[in-house]
Image (cartoon, coloured by chain):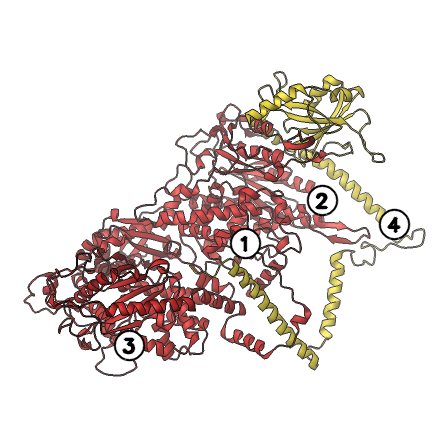
Amino acid sequence: MGPAPAGATGESEVMEPILESIGKGGKKASSKKRTVAGSPVEGLLQPVKLSRAELYKEPTSEELNRLRETESLFHSSLLRLQVEELLKEVRLSEKKKERIDTFLQEVKQRILRVPSTPETELMDQAWLPAGVRVPIHQVPFTVKGCFRFLPPVQVTIVGSYLLGTCIRPDINVDLALTMPREILQDKDGLNQRYFRKRALYLAHMAHYLAQDPLFGSVRFSYSNGCHLKPSLLLRPHGKDERLVTVRLHPCPPPEFFRLCRLLPTKNNVRSAWYRGQSPPGDGSPEPPTPHYNTWVLQDTVLESHVQLLSAALGSAPGLKDGVCLLKVWLRQRELDKGLGGFSGFLATMLVTFLTSTRKIHTTMSGYQVLRSVLQFLATTDLTVSGISSCLSSDPSLPALADFHQAFPVVFLDFSGHLNLCADVTASTYHQVQHEARLSMTLLDSKTDDGFQLLLMTPKPMVRTFDHILHLRPLSRLQTACHRLKLWPELQDHGGDYVSAALGPLITLLEQGLGSRLQLLGHSRPPVPEWGIHQDPPKHRDSGALTLGLLLRPEGLTSVLEMGPEADQSEAAVFRQLWGSRSELRRFQDGAIREAVVWEAASVAQKRLIPQQVVTHLLALHADIPDTCVHYVGGFLDALIQGPKETSSTGEEALAATVRCYDDLSRLLWGLEDLPLTVSAVQGVHPVLRYTEVFPPLPAWPAYSFYERLREQASLAPRPDKPCPAYVEPMTVVCHLEGSGQWPQDVEAVRRVRAAFQLRLAELLTQKHGLRCQATATHTDVLKDGFVFRVRVAYQREPQILRETRSPEGVMSLRDTPASRRLERDTKQLPLLTSALHGLQQQHPAFSGVARLAKRWVRAQLLGESFSDESLDLVAAALFLHPEPFSPPSSPQVGFLRFLCLVSTFDWKNNPLIVNLNNELTVEEQVEIRSGFLAARTQLPVMVITTPQDRKSSVWTQDGPSAQILQQLVILAAEALPILEKQLMDPWGPGDIRTVFRPPLDMYDVLIHLSPRHIPRHRQAVDSPAASFCRGLFADPRPSPLMPVLGYDPPQLYLAQLREAFGELALFFYDQHGGEVIGVLWKPTSFQPQPFKASSTKGRMVMSQGGELMMVPNVEAILEDFAVLGEGLVQTVEPRSERWTV
Amino acid sequence: MVARRRKREAREAEEKLPSPPGYSAIPIKFSEKQQACHYLYVKEHSVREGTKSTWPQKRTLFVLNVPPYCTEECLSRLLSPCGAVQSVELQEKPDLVENLKEPPSKFFHPKPVPGFRVAYVVFQKPGGVLAASTLKGPLLVSTESHRVKTGIHKWISEYTDSVLDPEALRAEVDTFMEAYDKKIAEEVAKAEEEEGVPDEEGWVKVTRRGRRPVLPRTEAASLRVLEKEKRKRARKELLNFYAWQHRETKMEHLAQLRKKFEEDKQRIELLRAQRKFRPY
């Protein structure tokens, strides 16, 4: 089941805010005590109980019909219900429709009553009243012709309102005003004359309508973002202001323009007029103006379109449903808005086209219509093979090829003259196709809740694309247009340099990014609104042009752009593209080729090669300096870079550690003198699955800094020095073969294992000269500066721990905490580690995402409530179940989706299924879900299932508690919009660490620690400018002594605090260099309690109203905080008086 | 907070410290520097009639709420003014049985992190118990002469102690295994001796070791047998053979659909309640 929509974040009615409820019944117990059997908890699904009679009663024919229909028309009954609910939600209610209809009647009357004006020259606009400005840029101003205002001859409702396919919110009703023939003259189609008249017509009308009290607001906007075609927006007065927006579109009388003048090959904007030059005498033909022609054409067909559509959709409710669903689908993907968007109108036309070609039948359900349209979009590339709804085979009609020449995307309407997709860029269409393909695979897979992911999950740009790139200021594109020699396009677009430059720029970047790129999307400039007394907004006012890059992970590994061989003709093209960056290189196979080499040493830098490509190409070809390009791709890298590291995000260090581990495992395999042979060596530490936030660095201790324990040949910390560097041993499980020689008694097995640990240490020292140190449970091995903790394991030991003998002597197997722990550590953890290791090989961004996610959770001081493995699995889910997105290829987008998943996933009613290695079939997943519902109350609050762990959710057994999880959900829901806003801000992200700083105001007590004794002080989110020497050399030198292992005073301190005061308070700490421990009192423990010998811990007796009650001895406890952490604790700062009872 | 403390101090001065019935309170704090005290609640160890306790009657003092930094030695030193202390035992929770076994191996049972605990203090003479109940205090855990390590110093010394000598471990393992092997050998010998020998009533115990081994007596084995039986029966059964069987299968399918439909309806109901059908 996918993430729930954004509305889910405000579920405060079902989970109490953390402050009131934290600590209810303790951390561990709370998950199990959450529900009392029998009483249904609000917002929790209960297993359905139907009586036998209800289940097996005779079916009615109606019921049978419905069931049959569901099976044939919809995917499942759930989907059917969901679609019905959604349509109910977005459809306009009958009541509102009535209100809108009466409003429309009024509007019509008002419009027809606007007075006429005497005829004047077009350029003489002095007659316009003072309070209104012409809603069009009149560049150049000089234009021939006369204008007078006459009321429209006809006012018709066009568009989706009439068809009943308009969706909430933002209800728009389009009114077409047919201008009288007297206003227009011959040749008005030329040189923007028609558009100027249209604008003046609206301006005059606006002036009169603005005085009418019926309207709450009268404003201008561009219809479909085309800045030559303003439209007038009318909204009702008073409380109905948000009910509806009526848009007025003036249009010419029917058959006023001759269609042959408006073919895509014709010119209707003369260069002489537009550029103010005399025509070039050499007789070179005028450039065609296809977009201009289309805009004129659009106005002529408004009415005929609506007739056609109502004929096609009129009697088929399924088609209307389908159109509504398509509109929702497009809107969730932000594809329908702005100039050149794939609008709802286009979707409607596509549905009619498919109906006419019999791909869709009128009896189909809305879901089937959606599916068919998506199927069509996914498989048809309109940029290559355009389609036409025109059925006639008239030879006078223009050829499709002409349209392909003029427009990137071709979809002709029934007349065969108008390209409906004229403004849609190739890149937008490719994005639509990409989305359709993703959606189709999702629908075909049948595993997830397609409805949620398809129609309810928003896909904002920042969360969809791996990297984002802002071009600002937009005025820079004007120079780019000149540099790219785009004068004909400017002439065609009437000076809109953003649209004119967009296409060529995108083509250029696509060419340059080549194999690194999967998809390049761009934001569509939003359609502005402005008051009637204002000038229309300038092109540069729409902020920034934002491009999104969806990267191809396999293309990101190479630093080389290989060109053609030097003597081939393509070499010149290659050199032209790359300019001075292209150089001749001789390759190993002897070929001499043109090539471009980018500088990138680490994986992190390689991920950012697209930035180098983009800035280079834009500067070279479009004259856009890198100061105008704001590339958002690696801002979050800083948070997973090691201290004093700037170029790498740790992937290299992790790989080095894994290599060292591989060497060690080879040594272990090769040990011959062990009494039993090694049957498996498996890593279990997070480093060995690439998810440790800060990878370990080889430790070369400086002896003078330490106490030397001569007998054991190891080092120990010294009280007079700062805490030494933190060296964490990496655990490796080493399975020994089974044998009859193993004892069958728990204690004896432990002794034998200890003997093996000793023997292992001995052998590794003797044979390979490694410094080893054996204890009863593990052997620490020092290799190349890394320390590995080898644990010997015996396959049958969990089995032995489980055995219990009943009084009758029957042996049975029962899970015990010890057996579960052992099984988890020696069986499940190695499996998980190897599966995630494999995932990293498939998706190189996994490491970065998992580490950023973990870093964030820990920085919020919640890290200790979540096991490492559970967070790794959540990160893995982003890659294995990315729907409706594609798997992330950059840590940035992965982290955003992590926040989104955490904040919107309905943990109460769904298990998070992480299908590692794709082992679970659809049926098994269904089974897991139903099993989950039945056992919900016994399961932990957060349930993560994997193929290896289908029932118990081992990694979340010990936490988080419901309150902690809820706190994480709240924090993630807060962090996501902040971070997205920062990243989408074209002028820079500001302080990217903002969302990583924890809120401290909720804690009752803060314990400030001394940095001197925090070994990982430098890893802090705000890395300290100076810290202490930790007794390490920077360069390798052989060391015969074992460094100090796992010595972390804050952790030792926390363990003591939790043991002593765990009943009274919760303790929160960021293990990565946190300087503060947050303490939260548990309100329930602060209730005065009667005396009980078993619960006196840290409490004292007070007499309250003559009765002796136990209350926590807060003053003494606060002082204990300081006593227990002597040397480590700087101050204990009580911040609230909440405990006073 | 300050006001409250002052008020309490004033009250403490004039009256006896409040303590639960039967107990008396002794203030205890870490050192001179601390302002506030924890309170030890002590009483003579006594048990109800009929319950067995291994602690010596009359001479044992039961102490509640011992702070984490207070060790056995420390408690012994603090209570010695009341009379010679024979032994002190700190425990997680009250336990009537004295832990007489030898201390667990430090290799296999590392010391747990201490929290607040209870203590059984055995005095050499019964007088000590009485004297302890009237002790005034406040007791100081750490003084000039007897410094108790906490914080960094404690952790460093613990770290040093945790680095153990492998040779000692080897010796311990060897002794344990020797004893274990001996025990197993004895068991085997005994079993062999009893093999096939009838007991007083003439029953012969059949074991896996005998000449004709039997199924092991485990749950898994019996489940396996049952499973096998079930499969055998299922093989023989005919499916959809009779008309009524056919009808039932159909009805079963319908019931499944109905159940699914109900489940879906519930899901939708929930989502609607949470307003999850607002797409944006």
2 and 4 marks in contact (CB < 8 Å):
no
Residue A150 lies, in percent from the top left, at: 18, 70
Q: Chain of mark 4?
A: B
Kindly identify which numbered label has been placed on residue A907. Answer: 1
Q: Pick whichever, A398 or A1095, lies toward us.
A: A1095
- Residue on which the image places disc 3: A304
Q: Are marks 1 and 4 on the same chain?
A: no
Of callouts 3 and 2, the N-terminal one:
3
4 and 3 marks in contact (CB < 8 Å):
no
Q: Chain of mark 2?
A: A
- Residue on which the image places disc 4: B194
Amino acid type of the residue that numbered disc 4 sits on in the rendered structure:
Glu
Q: Which chain is yellow?
A: B
Q: Helix, strand, or loop for circle 1? A: loop
Near mark 2 (Cα within 10 A), the count class, few <14, some 14-19 or many ≥20, is few
- Report how far apart the C-alphas of labels 3 and 2 lie in the structure: 86 Å
Q: Helix, strand, or loop for circle 4? A: helix
- Residue on which the image places disc 2: A746
Please count the marks in the image.
4
Q: Is residue A579 visible?
A: no
Amino acid type of the residue that numbered disc 3 sits on in the rendered structure:
Ser
